[in-house]
Image: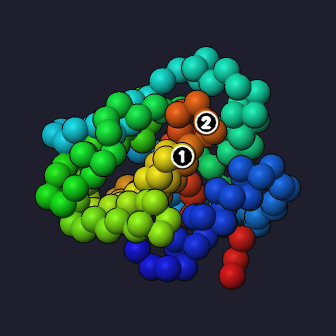
Amino acid sequence: MPVRSTALLVAALAVAACGRDATAPAEPARTTLLPTTVRMTGGAPLLELVPDAAVTDPTERARLADLRAAPWTVSAHVARLVADPDTLLVEGRAVAFDVNPSARLVFVGERRTASAATHSTSWHAALAGGTGDAIVVFTALGVTGSLHAHGPPYLSVGIQPLGPSGLHAIVQLDNGRFPPD
């Protein structure tokens, strides 16, 4: 994934998480909701979607609300880890990501890099049977990452921890709604 796209995703998620007001020009959507028929098979799930009611911490509820209110958000769902990222995110392993209640994408690990300095591990993967990529970083705080399907449908998804509860937000993004460079 180009560095610019990664930087935009990180910046967008950081702004939403901090609750700062951000405005974006109104543009037609270039990303659409995944049709309910997109359900790839295979792969072990890393995250499991859970009801919004699982978010009980007020700070985490506020963070989720900020993510949903961001102009570039198409949808946002709550998930929790169901597998140990350290054993699941390895080279050659197929990993499933439910990006909404009826759509699953599967990525196959291509490269894994551990950093002792940051106590993190990054996992780079390719979309199984399609054109797309995933970059996932896990630390003691949880999993942060981006998933991309290079179409159709064109899809960008961000994953980030909501807070110390272990719950995560899975946010489908509309790249056409980000502020211009």
- Residue placed most toward the observer, 178 or 58: 58
**Residue 65 found in image quarter:** top right
Earlier residue among tags 2 and 1: 1
Question: Residue at position x 76%, y 66% from top?
Answer: 25
**Disc 1: which residue:** 141
Residue 91 in sight from this viewpoint? yes
Horizontal side of residue 116 vs 76, given as left or right: left
Q: Secondary structure at mark 2?
A: loop
- Name the spot of residue 96 as percent of width and height, x first: 28, 42
Residue 2, above or below 19: below
Quarter containing the C terminus: bottom right
Task: Please give left or right for residue 99 compared with residue 60 in the image.
Answer: left
Q: Which of the 4 image quadrants contains residue 151?
A: bottom left
* Residue drawn at point x = 46 percent, y = 60 percent: 119
Residue 126 in view: no
Cα–Cα gap, marks 2 and 1: 7 Å
The residue most toward the front is: 116
Three-letter residue code for mark 1: Leu
Circle 2 packing at 10 Å, graded few (<14), some (14-19), many (20+), is few
Residue 34, percent from left and from top: 41, 44
Question: Which residue in the protein does label 2 denote?
Answer: 164
Q: Quadrant of the N terminus?
A: bottom left
What amino acid is labelled 2 in the image? Pro
Residue under the point 76% across and 64% down: 24
Task: Tell me the SS state at disc 1.
Answer: loop
